[in-house]
Amino acid sequence: MKRKSEKIAPCFGDAFDAAKPYVIMDGGLRVIDKDRIVGTVGKCGQLDLNFRYFGRRDRAERSRRERILEGMEEYETFPPISVYLYEGSYYVEDGHRRVAACKALGIQYIDARVKEYVYKGDERNIEGALTRRRFETETGLKNIDLRYEWGYSVLHRGAAHYPSDKGVKMRAQLWYSSWFLPFCTEIKNSRLVKRYPDLAPEDIYVIVVGFYDDFMGGVPRAAGFDTLISGFMFTHSIRERPLRRGFFRILRVLIFRVRRR
Amino acid sequence: MAGSFRTFIVRIILEDAIAFEEHSYRFYESALEKAVSGESRDIIGQLMRDEFRHRIKLEEVRKKGDLGRLDVPEGKDSSYIEAVSCSWPEIPAHAGTEEILEMALEREQCSYNFYASMEKHTRLKPARGTFSVLKGEEERHVHLIRDRMEKGT
């Protein structure tokens, strides 16, 4: 059985190192992944891991919780929650019951106003946070939530160079629906998710495309998504369909035996 | 198929060709780890990228699925057998650049023979086109390595 401390939602104050200097950025309104909401800012010690209040079984609390649950089930619009983004995880400032409802209903994404804390000494992360803002402002795409923000430079390059004669935002929309989303779906169905169990397909996309950018100066557009994934797996020595390979190897050996007779 | 024609399923050959390119890639990858310096290093890097590009090309052809059959006349297909049988050797721990380039040259010639044989015997346009392009690329590699060796490593 878990102890109470293991069931409590982590506290921002415990994770945050106040001795370090930080840049605080207004991330604006975004769509965030509920799986990355890990803790709370102001309700420390009061919530369980599903963001429900400990020890509050009163009628008023139950009624508020149920009202939100029902509303979400009926696709009612709720105001965005407020969160702090710190080292890739979100801490809820306002909207704990909405997060609890999302977790209970299995709703994967939620609207949030984001305030981001980036350690001043981490230049890569500061640059990442700035690239994210640039990407979101220029493309209008605010629903891609990467764990490592430096990856937005890869996304920005992809969206900016996507072949289309449309304007920047329209081109980015096309890139998103015709390239990025299908690619992420292919990644989701590949063995890469087992190789990178802590990363979402969007983050793995950044790794794969980043590899092609560095190694070949860009992604070969004529190649299919599965071919690109297979190429990446080969270069990174990730075993892929070993049974198929073995089957063809045996078949070839058999053919040669027949030929030699 | 009985008679004077031996039938190879294209898929098997493509799998062979992909494995071929993969071995080439690994060879150059390990060559890069050795103490190869200067222009030779750039050339090996370029060859490595090319082999990877070939693999992508072949994967795309393989994915197109039912390419039918490839008929190789008996007695004239020794280049295929030879090419498939030639292996990428391990690079000795203290191999110098010249030795590495010599090994690479031998293998590129082998690859050229393989694709030349495939191009000659394939009647299917998409596969023949790919084999023809790859043959040209392997020929370019042979020239590239020879030039480098002539200039001195």
Image: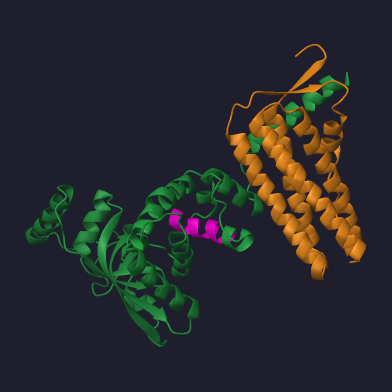
Chain colours: A green, B orange
Task: Decide which of A66, A60 is in the foreground and name it.
Answer: A66
Residue A204 among magenta residues: yes
- For the N terminus of chain B, give its image quadrant: top right
Point out the residue furthest to the front here.
Answer: A165
Q: Is residue A53 visible?
A: no
Q: Position of residue A208 (x, y in %)?
A: 54, 56
Image point (85%, 45%), residue name: B109
Quadrant housing residue A39: bottom left
Q: Position of residue A33 (x, y in %)?
A: 33, 59
Q: Is residue A183 left or right of residue A10?
A: right
Give the vertical position of B92 relative to A40 (above or below). Answer: above
Image point (78%, 60%), residue name: B44
Task: Decide which of A29, A139 is in the foreground and name it.
Answer: A139
Residue A79 among magenta residues: no
Q: Is residue B143 left or right of residue A198?
A: right
Quadrant housing residue B13: top right
Across the whole image, how many numbered discs are drawn on residues? Answer: 0
Please state the extent of the stretch shown in magenta in the rendering: A199-211
Q: Position of residue A41 (x, y in %)?
A: 27, 74
Image point (34%, 57%), residue name: A170
Q: Position of residue A98 (x, y in %)?
A: 20, 60
Image point (71%, 53%), residue name: B50
Q: Is residue A17 visible?
A: yes
- For the C terminus of chain B, give its image quadrant: bottom right
Q: Is residue B86 left or right of residue B7?
A: right
Dominant SS type (magenta): helix
